[in-house]
Image (cartoon, rainbow, N blue to C red):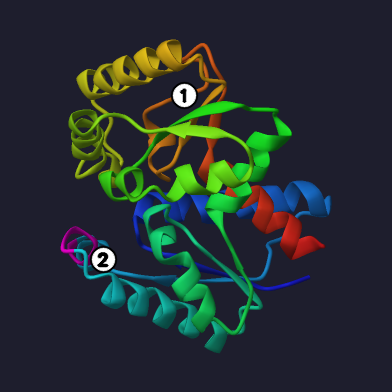
Amino acid sequence: MKKLGIVGGIGPESTLDYYKGINAGYAQRACGGGNPPLIIDSLNLADMYALAANKQWPEFTERLAGSVRNLVAGGAEFAVMAANTAHIVFEAVERQSSIPLLSIVEETCRAAKAKHCKTVVIFGTAFTMSSGLYNEAFARYGIAAHVPSAEEQAVIHGIIFPHLQEGIVLPAEKAAMLQIAGRMVAELNADALVLGCTELPLIIKPDDLAVPLLDTTEIHIEASLNYMLA
């Protein structure tokens, strides 16, 4: 069994989801209950947001790489970054890592391919949606990925920060988000909506749309368990 390291804090709510999900999944698979070996290094969300907003990607990368080094010092044998936006610099962080890193983007692409998706809609922070991160990754799997317009990205980003990052769900904000999702799914005849921000499952639920959701948090947790127990 391999010890997992989690780069957390970006944000705190999703870090809790990872911790609870990995513990619950481990107990279910291990049959005898108990807890898996893992360690969390929690970064400051406000600091990381400021770096991303100012496009200070070298500094952003170094914070993440430093966090991975802290996890290695704590005995981690592989690691995950518990945030989609962090994966904008995944390859740069991976190059500095002495342990394997599991990518939430690659695992989500594999999950979509397994479900035979041809076209997907991507929701996430404005950083993630505008970066082309998922579009390029899905293209390598032969899947067309589409993001909302710049104006709609601003609406979604404004819901994630600050409310979803603090675990707050407002009915009007949920309605606005579902309106964008419903329109895009219908216009594109999409096969799924990718929840490309680890806080989005707080506001968009499986029964909210006529197409399946690809919950990147859930997918990443499952991949972590598979790697841990392989």
Which residue is the extreme one toward the bottom?
Answer: 73
**How many neighbours does mark 2 have within 10 angstroms: few (below 14), some (14-19), or many (20 or more)?**
many
What residue is rendered at 29% in x and 50% in y? 127
- Of labels 2 and 1, earlier in sequence is 2
**Residue 54 in the figure: left or right of residue 100:** left
Of tags 2 and 1, which is closer to the observer? 2
Query: Residue 48's mark?
Result: 2
Query: Residue 100's mark?
Result: none
Is residue 53 highlighted in magenta? yes
CA–CA distance in space, label 2 to label 1: 27 Å
- Residue 219 position, x and y percent, is 61, 44
Can you say which quadrant of the picture contains the C terminus?
A: bottom right
**Residue 172 in the figure: left or right of residue 85:** left
Residue 7 drawn above or below residue 154:
below
Which stretch appears magenta?
Answer: 50-54
**How many neighbours does mark 1 have within 10 angstroms: few (below 14), some (14-19), or many (20 or more)?**
few
- Residue 215 position, x and y percent, is 53, 37
Picture quadrant of residue 203:
top left
What residue is rendered at 53% in x and 51% in y? 105
**Residue beneath disc 1:** 205
Most common SS among magenta residues: helix
**Residue 206 in the figure: left or right of residue 128:** right
- For label 1, the SS is loop
Can you say which quadrant of the picture contains the N terminus?
A: bottom right
- Residue 187 position, x and y percent, is 41, 12
Q: Amino acid at mark 2?
A: Met
- Residue 210 position, x and y percent, is 52, 11
Residue 98 drawn above or below residue 31:
below
